[in-house]
Image (cartoon, helix red, strand yellow):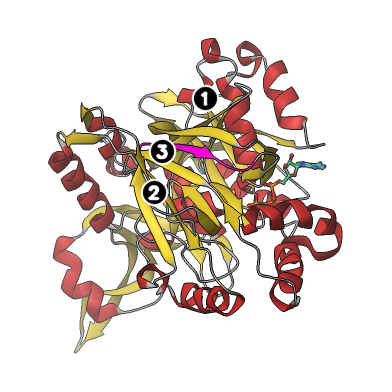
Amino acid sequence: MGNSAIEIQNDELLSYKLGSVWKDSPIDGKEVDLYFQPGKLFFTMERREISLSGSTKLSKKCETIISCDNVYGVSTFEDYLLNDVGATYRLSIMNFEEKSEKFETFNYYFRNEEEFKKAKLKCASYNCTHREGVERNICVLVNPISGKKVSREYYSDILKPVLQFNRIKHEMYETQSATYIDEFISELNLKEHSFNEFVVIGGDGVFSQLLNAIVKYPERKMIQFPIGLMPGGSTNSLCCALSGKNPYTACKNIANKSLLKGDVFNVKMNDSKQSIYSTALSYGLPSDLVRESENLRDFFGRYRYIATAIPKFISPKKFPVYKSEVYYKLEDYEDQGTEDSNTEKDQRTNSRVNVPKVSEYKTKSNCKNYKSESEWRKIDIDEFSFHVIITHENRSSVGKDVNAPFARIDDGFMYIFGVKKCTRIQALNFLSKASKGTQVGYEKFFYQKATELRFRNPSGSYFCSDGEPYRSNDYTVKVLPGFVNLMGEIVKE
Ligand SMILES: Nc1ncnc2c1ncn2[C@@H]1O[C@H](COP(=O)(O)OP(=O)(O)OP(=O)(O)O)[C@@H](O)[C@H]1O
């Protein structure tokens, strides 16, 4: 927010006057005119009378500017005050003050009912309570022990005020144990609660638990519910792909209900156990680190992986090598109708409107027709330091590194990437390159796009998926394109 009379007066022709209003109070508020430049600004002009050599002229001075980038909602109210004022017509704008990281609300009281009704229509796209004609009702799941233990704060200080301002119904539940989500979903009575969306404030692990819990009950169609994420966990890889690292951006995507179809993958083990994952399936060093670091969670928190990794890099023992036979299929597809959807999506991004959203647009991943069944091909490497399967770029909220810059959550593919058998020095070299994002060209690095992967690993070996270890040496992984409705936008950094 700022004051710039000249800029606004030049731009005034592009603006729509919402009405003549009292600022802050219908009784003794300042009289101003409220303007709106769609996707850009709300601003007010103060009307003042100035005397010029005996005659009086009306002059206008810009009074308040609110950038749409910082608007988290616009609500309208028809209040009836029990005093002389009678009916009042209020338009409230929720603004995020970046410097103080605080929300503030601007209230404008219309003098004229007709103007208020027109203003309400003009700002209709800011009505976040209803999307696609349906009243929203969100089940918010908060993991109080994940990551830096900020999930509760993210709920009370960011999400809750934004949902309340936008009059979006929600109920919050804190996970009470490691099995809470599974039990919660199995007992959830949708007739009683009528939820139609989920929000997870926590890490990749709880999101994965939710996904696996809801697919167990296909008849309840919860997989159709949009799922929003706020980065309360240690790594928040999926949230980083949807909203970046900033909890406010994540909250805005939830308020907007900005939807995209996210790819996940399905893992089938030799004992026919099957699960759905969203973040990463790792084999080799990272999977050992996850297993070995779990008992350090209480002491080191999100730094437990680093605490476990350091001894591996300084120990005189041989640097670990992991055998693995990897086969992949890459089915080709035809892209249909993506031009329209991209144009619409670009317009949305360019408009810089915050809370309003384009509710329906085709996403890339629902527009694919597979052309041909491809054959299994073997990756020409048998010994690795590690390999990882992901469906998105795998950015962590802790560091600046991006593990798979070639992957996007809605591109319809998964990717296997990793480091071939290497020495300790080469591994350190890789880490240094990865921290600068230059690992893709490194000779020890490899990656392969795939629609299906099959693994044959030494017996007794483990892999880790979404932070959970599994013992299996024979497993198949298949991408499920556009399987889950996620609230977010592809992060471009
Ligand atoms: N109240 C609780 N007590 C003990 N464990 C819990 C509780 N609530 C959730 N959990 C477990 O915490 C684990 C980790 O959760 P989560 O993924 O949110 O955080 P994280 O591991 O810190 O972050 P990330 O997955 O992004 O690295 C999950 O396996 C979940 O089952």
Q: Nearer the viewer, mark 2 or mark 1?
A: 2
Quadrant of residue 178 within the rendered picture: top right
In the visual, does 15 lie left or right of 124? Answer: left
Q: Quadrant of residue 479?
A: top left
Residue that label 2 marks: 379
Give the Cα separation between the discs numbered 1 and 3.
20 Å
Q: Earlier in the sequence, mark 1 or mark 3?
A: 1
The span picked out in magenta is: 451-458
- Identified by mark 3, the residue type is Asp
Q: Position of residue 345 (x, y in %)?
A: 24, 47
Pointer 3 residue: 263
Specify whether residue 199 is in view.
Answer: yes
From the top left corner, tell me how far across and down residue 468 is, in percent. Answer: 68, 43
Residue at 60 percent across and 21 percent down: it is 272
Q: Using the image as rendered, state which of residue 92 and residue 83 is in the foreground.
A: 92
Q: Could you tell me the amino acid type at mark 1?
A: Asn
Identify which residue is drawn at 20% across, 51% down.
347
